[in-house]
Image (cartoon, rainbow, N blue to C red):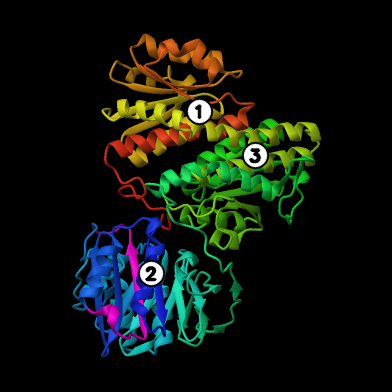
Amino acid sequence: MCGIVGVVGANNAVNKIISGLKKLEYRGYDSAGVAVIENSSFQMVKQEGKILNLEKAAKKSKFLDKFFNAAIGHTRWATHGRPSERNAHPHASSKVCVVHNGIIENYQELKSILQKKDVNFVSDTDSEVVPHLLEMNMHNSNLDQAIVKTLSQIKGSYALAIMISSHPDFIIIAKKGSPLLVGFGKDENFIASDYYALASFTNKISYLEDEEFAYVYNDHVDFFNLNAQKISKEIRLMESSENNVSKDGFENYMLKEIYEQPMVLENTLQNYVDLQNNKIHLPNFLFDLSKIKKITAIACGTSYYSAMIAKYIIEDIAQISVEVEIASEFRYRKAVFDDSNLMIFISQSGETADTIAAMKYAKQNKQKILSIVNVAQSSMAHLSDAIIKTMAGPEIGVASTKAYTAQISVLAILAIEFATKNKKIDGEEAGFYLKQISNSIHSIKQIISKESINNIKKVAKKLIKYNDILYIGRGVSYVTALESSLKMRELSYINAQGIAAGELKHGTIALIDKKMPIIAIAYNNNLFEKIASNIEEVKARQGRVYLVADSHAKKEISGLAEDVINVPDVSGFIEESLTGVVALQLLAYYVALYKGNDVDQPRNLAKSVTVE
C-alpha cells in the first residue's frame, strides 16, 4: 500500500525520489514526503494529497536545486491517524529519521514507554515510535546493537528506511513482512518497496528477507541478519526495458486497461498454448501434477473471485476437489494439510500481505506452493515452488480489470493441463476448452465496440441515482456477480452486493421493492431456466431488473427488464466467465465517471495491499 524510495550518492537525489514515488502512485496513497540531511540535521517536505503537491513544495524549498548525498521518500496510505501533512512520512526524532511500511502492533505500549521518558510525539501514527525508540537505544549501544534491539522490540510488520543525522553517507533498511529491495547503480544505490519504482535507474537488485537489515552506501551495501552477522545476498538482473504505462490517448488508465483485455488473452495464449496442436506449455513444476488429489486456492479481493472461477473450471474439467479460501481467514485457522494437496496462491501484485502470510503458513506445513502472479520478481514469486506469470502487463488502475481476466485465463489453462495429465480429457476436448479462451478475444472486442459502449452508457446513466444495487447470477455468472458488484462498490461508492440467484428466496428477497435495481446475468446454458425463474421472482416483487443477456436470454426474458446490456453468445462456461465481467466492468466505470469519481484512484483504496 505505502511506497518507499531511497537513494544514496545521487547528484539529484530528491528528483530521483520524486520520480520513483510517481511510479508508485498506482498503489494508492493519501500523502507523500521526502527527507534529506543538511548540516547534520533533517530537512523534510511533506504534503497531503498528490505527489504533484510534494513536487511543488520541494521546488519552493529549493530541495530540487541542491546536492544531497542521501534522501528517503514515502507515499502513505493511512492506517493510524487520518490523512494529513502531520501524519505523512517521514517521521523523525532529533537524530533518526524514518519512513515505514506495515503496522507496528505494539506501538501504544512502546509509545507509553517513550512518553514516560519525556519523548514528545507530533503525529498520530504508529510509525513515529521507531525513530524515538532507535535514538533511545543508541544512547547505550553501538549502531548495530541499537538496530537489532529496536527491531526485536517491534511487533508487527515493517519495511523501514532510516537515516541517522550524523551519518549522511548511508541509509539503513530493515524488513519483516513488507517488501523491500536494494537497487545497485553506478556510484549510487537505491532502495524501494517495489522494483517498478527503480526500473528507470537500475536493473540490478537484491531482496531483503524477513528479519534482515542493511547499510546502503553509494558504492556498496552491507547486509546483516538480526544477530548482526554479515551475510551475502544474490544480485538479480531484472528486465531493463520499461513497460508502456502511458494512457495511450485514453481518458484514464482504467478504460485503457479494460480495452487491453483482448490483447492480454492473446499474449496468454501465445505464451502458454500451441493452439494448432492443442498443446500447453506451462513452466516446469517441482511436483507431479498427476499426483495432486486436492487443490486449495487462496487469495484476497478480486483474486479471490478468480480463484472461485478456478474451482468451477478445475472441478468440472479435471475432476479434482478445490477449496477456495480467503487468505486473511485461512492463516488464522488450524487447516488440515495433506502431502497430496497443492496450494495455489493468487495475487496481481505478488505483495498482498495476507496472501503472503497464508503462504508462509502453508510452507511451514510443507505444502506444495504454486503462485499465479503478475509480477515475476515479487515476494510471492520468491517464496513459491513454482509460478505461472499472468500476461496482464502493468495494471495502474487501482480497481483490477485486465489482471482478473489474465488470472482466469491461466487458471483455465492450468485446469486443462491437469485434466490432460490425469487423462480426464483427450486432445480434442482440450482443444474445445482452449478454443473458449480464444473465442473470448473476439467476444470482448464486441463488448468494447462503440455500439456496445453506447448501450452500457445508457444503462449507467439510469443507475447513478441509486444508493444500492443487487447483482445476481448462477454458475460462473454468480462469481461474475460478486466481482462486478465489487467493481461497482470500488468505483461508484454505491452499496452493490452480489449473490447466487438461488439464494434470493433465503432472505435477500426481503430487500426487493420498486426502488431496488437488480442486475441479472443470464446466458443460454443449463442454468438459464433457473435464472429466468429467479428474475420472475424479482419482477413479481416490483424489482427493477437490468438484464445482462446473450441473444437467447434477450429473446426470452427481455420483457422482464427495464433495460438490457447485450453480451455475445458464448461457447461454454470458460468464455462466459471471461466476457460478461467486461461488460460489467464498463458499467461500473461509466457509473463512477458520471458521478465525477476518480476511476483510477478511488477513495480509500490501494493497489498493493501490504498491511493486514
Instruction: Say which residue appears at 72% left-offset and 31% top-offset.
Output: 432
Do labels 3 and 1 touch, CB within 8 Å?
A: no
In primary-sequence order, the first of circles 2 and 1 is: 2
Tell which circle, 3 or 1, labels the residue nearer the N-terminal end.
3
Image spot of residue 188 (x, y percent): 46, 83
Task: Name the residue nearer the viewer: 428 or 454.
Answer: 454
Tell me the residue that label 1 is attached to.
478
Closer to the eye: label 3 or 1:
3
User: What amino acid is labelled 1 in the image?
Assistant: Tyr
Q: Which residue is mark 2?
A: 19
Q: CA distance from mark 3 to mark 2?
A: 38 Å
- Marks 2 and 1 sit apart, C-alpha to C-alpha, by 42 Å
**Residue with the mark numbered 3:** 412
Residue displayed at 22% across by 70% down: 57
Q: Residues within 10 Å of mark 1 (few under 14, many from 20)?
A: many
Q: What amino acid is at disc 3?
A: Ala
Judged left or right of residue 210, residue 310 is right
Image quadrant containing the C terminus: bottom left
Question: Where on the picture, by quarter, is residue 280?
Answer: top right
Mark 3 or mark 2: which comes first in sequence? 2
Q: Amino acid at mark 2?
A: Ser
Q: Is residue 109 left or right of residue 501?
A: left
Disc number placed over residue 36 in the picture, else none? none
Which quarter of the figure has residue 506?
top left
Q: Which residues are magenta?
A: 62-81
Is residue 64 shown in magenta?
Answer: yes
Looking at the image, which residue is at 25% across and 76% down? 44
Q: Quick one: label 2, few (<14), some, or many (20+) residues within 10 Å?
A: some
